[in-house]
Image (tube, rainbow, N blue to C red):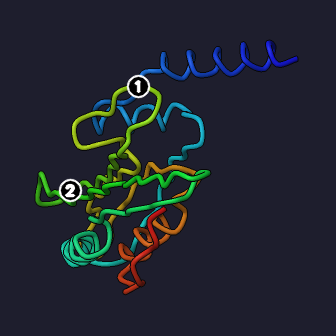
C-alpha cells in the first residue's frame, strides 16, 4: 500500500515539474484563456471614465497589493518561516489601454518549475477604453485562493474604494 502511494506521489511531483510555467504576462493570459487548471478568464464592461478608473486602480494597487506576507509555524520542535512577496503594477502602454499585472515570489520556493522574473503570475487584466465614459476589462485570474483580490480589483475599476484584500 505504501509503495503505491509513494509511486503516485512521485509521479504527480514529476508531472508537476514538467508542466511549463508561463514566463511572460502574454503566456499567462494565453494559458488561462485556453483553460488552465484553477484559473478563469472573464470580461466585463464599466460605465466610467477610463483615465479616472486607471488612476484609481493604480493608487489602490500601490497601496494594497505590493506587500510581503511573512508566516511562521511550529512543526514538531522546529519553527519554519516563509514569506510571499507580492508585486502588482498598472501600466498604460497607450492612451486608451492599460495593463494590470500581479505576481508573487515565494521563499522558500518549493517544488516545481522555476518562476519567471518577478515571480509567478497570479492575475492580469487588459483594460481598454471603448468610449469617453466606458471601458472593457478582460481579467485573467485564479479560481482558488485570491477571490478577495479579484473582487477588489473589479470593485476598484468600478470606482469603489474597497479596503485592501488580505493576501494569502
Residue 1 horizontal/vertical position (percent): 88, 17
> On the picture, is 51 further left or further right than 86?
left
Query: Which of marks 2 and 1 precedes in the sequence?
Result: 2
Image point 16% across, 57% down: which residue? 91
Q: Mark 1 points at which residue?
A: 113
Question: Quick check: 16 above or below 83?
Answer: above
Image point 26% across, 64% down: which residue? 66
Rendered image quadrant of residue 31: top left
Image point 78% across, 20% down: which residue? 5
As drawn, the residue found furthest toward the front would be 77
Residue 131 horizontal/vertical position (percent): 27, 67
Rendered image quadrant of residue 37: top right
Residue 118 horizontal/vertical position (percent): 23, 43
Q: Mark 2 points at which residue?
A: 97
Rendered image quadrant of residue 53: bottom left
Front-most of residues 98 and 150:
150
Question: Quick check: 161 above or below 4?
Answer: below
* Element marked by disc 2: strand
> On the picture, is 166 further left or further right than 38?
left
Residue 89 horizontal/vertical position (percent): 22, 58
Mark 1 packing: few (<14 Cα in 10 Å), some, or many (20+)?
Answer: some
Of discs 1 and 2, which sits in the foreground?
Answer: 1
Asked if disc 1 and disc 2 are in contact, CB closer than 8 Å, the reply is no
Structural distance between the alpha carbons of marks 1 and 2: 32 Å
As drawn, the residue found furthest toward the right would be 1
> On the picture, is 6 further left or further right than 90?
right
Front-most of residues 61 and 116:
116
Question: Quick check: 24 above or below 84?
Answer: above
Mark 2 packing: few (<14 Cα in 10 Å), some, or many (20+)?
Answer: some
Image point 41% across, 32% down: which residue? 30
Amino acid at each position: 500500500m505504501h509503495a503505491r502511494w509513494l509511486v503516485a506521489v512521485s509521479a504527480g511531483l514529476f508531472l508537476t515539474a514538467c508542466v511549463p510555467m508561463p514566463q511572460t504576462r502574454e503566456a499567462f493570459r494565453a494559458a488561462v484563456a485556453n483553460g488552465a487548471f484553477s484559473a478563469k478568464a472573464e470580461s466585463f464592461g464599466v460605465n466610467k471614465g477610463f483615465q479616472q478608473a486607471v488612476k484609481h486602480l493604480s493608487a489602490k494597487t500601490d497601496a494594497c497589493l505590493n506587500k510581503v506576507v511573512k508566516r511562521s509555524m511550529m512543526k514538531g520542535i522546529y519553527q519554519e518561516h516563509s514569506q510571499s512577496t507580492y508585486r502588482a503594477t498598472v501600466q498604460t502602454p497607450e492612451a486608451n489601454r492599460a495593463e494590470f499585472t500581479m505576481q508573487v515570489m515565494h521563499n522558500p520556493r518549493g517544488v516545481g518549475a522555476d518562476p519567471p522574473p518577478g515571480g509567478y503570475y497570479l492575475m492580469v487584466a487588459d483594460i481598454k477604453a471603448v468610449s469617453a465614459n466606458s471601458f472593457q476589462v478582460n481579467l485573467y485570474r485564479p479560481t482558488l485562493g485570491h477571490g478577495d483580490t479579484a473582487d477588489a480589483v473589479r470593485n476598484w475599476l468600478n470606482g469603489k474604494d474597497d479596503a485592501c484584500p488580505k493576501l494569502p
